[in-house]
Image: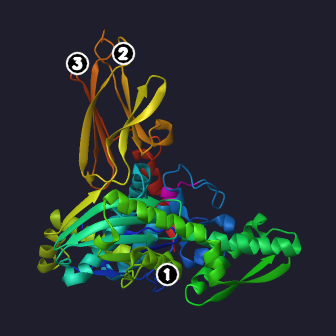
Amino acid sequence: MSGKVVGIDLGTTYSAIATLDDRGQPVTLPNRDGEMLTPSAVLLLEGQAVVGQAALDVAQEQPENVATLIKRRMGHDSYGRTVAGKQLRPETLSAIILRKLVQDVEPRIGPVRKAVITVPAYFDDTRRKATKDAGRIAGLEVLDILDEPSAAALAYSFQTSHGMGPEPAQNVLVYDLGGGTFDVTLVRLSRKRFQTLAIEGDVRLGGKDWDDRIVHHVANKFVEKYGDDPRDDQQSLSMLQAAAERAKRTLSKVESASVTVNHAGKKLVVPITRAEFEQLTADLLIRTRLTTLQLLKQAKLSWNQIHRILLVGGSTHMPMTGRMLRELSGQTPDNSLAVSEVVARGAAIHAGIVATRSGEAGSLAASAQELLADVVEINVNSHSLGIEVRDNDERINDILIPKNTQIPAAASRVYRTVKENQQRVRVRVLQGEAHQADACISIGECWIEELPPNLPKGSPIQVRCGVLSNGLVDVMALDMTSGRMARTEIHRSSGLSEEEIAREAAWVRELTIQ
């Protein structure tokens, strides 16, 4: 498959696409409207889909026909409500966004076939597979799934010393507050070497939660005055949400803003100051603070061992984030990178590295390929990986690969059958830190079938789990009595089969995407 290689930041609220120029430097590519960021919103019409700002505009009038915040549903088996009367999966809606991004840049750079797509560092295996499936539905060969903070740090590393990385080595903390997710990651950067040390995060915390605080504050004022709640009407709520996001952006630049509510023929203008907004959202900021402190504790580092703090994600434009990090660390965070574009740029660099190693970077100059070929990348897993085992009447999570282990990684352990003449064994794979299996994420299972007859209770079964460099999981089980082995890419509790991916891809191909 020939064609250009790109990096894509598939965001909760905005998405971006980047590639490398012939010198190996990352460049963000504008969409058809000339904008570097494309709103992650999809309007469905008969036989066509509209992606971006136009879809957001229509959402205020026809919210039932528009999908937004799709990324927050990744890993679920549906978007959560109908869109234009259709039940759709988040992978399919995401694929429409990916197709739009690619379609807009192809007239400028030529056919796009391969991509690296980024995800929050704290995405589990199910969400990562859903993201990869979205890329495949969009007709892309997904070279890799890359953590967003890692992409940002990679872009920063290439910005210093013309892509060679800092010298001497630096410990860099990446504080990534996007529209729908929050990650904080520690990375060690040195000359041509890029090593992730530790990851923490919250996939249910992002700029949207700050917006919602304004929505509820303003809606409550409206209820006090008129006794009617704009949140009960989908159209009024959509208009209020858009006004709240605009007010948040305004408050990042000036000290006061106002939000206008129109509902049921009544209108109310509610002023809000930056101080009020910060008070309304103080607990959300504290959550990011505690997560950041937890990261340092896990990495066993103190603030005086952190050389730089990088701000990533559009929500870091809020002055409260930089101020909190200054108070916490004693140093001024670095926002020199374009915080909303840096992830796509880092993904493009990683795509170039992967393509160069596989000999498929023909569009890059020889000097750029030489630079990329020598870069060493080391990542860690964001969640512990374990096996569900029975301990008397309790089902527990027996962790094989602890969180923040360098990947790729593998570990094995011997377990025992639980009854006489057992015919098969189920190996259920979990992600999470909890002791109880039910409190963890079940990412799937495999079976060892047709065990030898008359096996005594307590016969040994060896289980080996591996985490690939992109965070996806592989599992193998061996009956040590017969030598029978089961190896599988896990029968996942959720996710799409090959047939379903092909079916969704065919449907997306039939759409006219604007």
At 56% from the left and 78% from the top, the residue drawn is: 53
Residue drawn 70% across the image and 75% down it: 240
Mark 2 belongs to which amino acid? Gln
Callout 1: SS: helix
Q: Nearer the viewer, residue 143 or 509?
A: 143
What type is the residue that disc 1 sits on? Answer: His
Mark yes or no: residue 395 visible.
yes
Give how far apart the Cα atoms at labels 3 and 2 are.
Answer: 12 Å
The residue stretch that appears in magenta: 88-93
Among the two numbered marks 1 and 2 on one chain, the one whose residue lies closer to the N terminus: 1
Q: Which quadrant: the N terminus?
A: bottom left
Q: Which mark is residue 317?
A: 1
Which residue is rendered at x = 46% and y = 84% of the image? Answer: 35
Q: Nearer the viewer, residue 376 or 353?
A: 376
Identify the image's colour scheme: rainbow, by chain, secondary structure or one colour: rainbow
Q: Are marks 3 and 2 in contact (CB under 8 Å)?
A: no
Name the residue tied to disc 3.
481
Relative side of 314 to 378, left or right:
right
Reply yes or no: does residue 91 show up in magenta.
Answer: yes
Residue identifier under label 2: 422
Dividing the picture into quarters, in which one does residue 50 lie? bottom right
Label 1 and label 2: CA atoms lie apart by 59 Å
Spatial distance from mark 3 to mark 1, Cα to Cα? 60 Å
- Nearest-to-viewer mark from 1 and 2: 1
- The picture places residue 367, in percent across and down from the top left corner, at 12, 80
Comparing labels 3 and 1, the label whose residue is closer to the camera: 1
Asked if residue 181 lies left or right of residue 109, the reply is right
Is residue 419 depicted above or below 234 in this figure?
A: above
With respect to residue 324, does 377 lie above or below?
Answer: above
Q: Main secondary structure of the magenta part?
A: helix
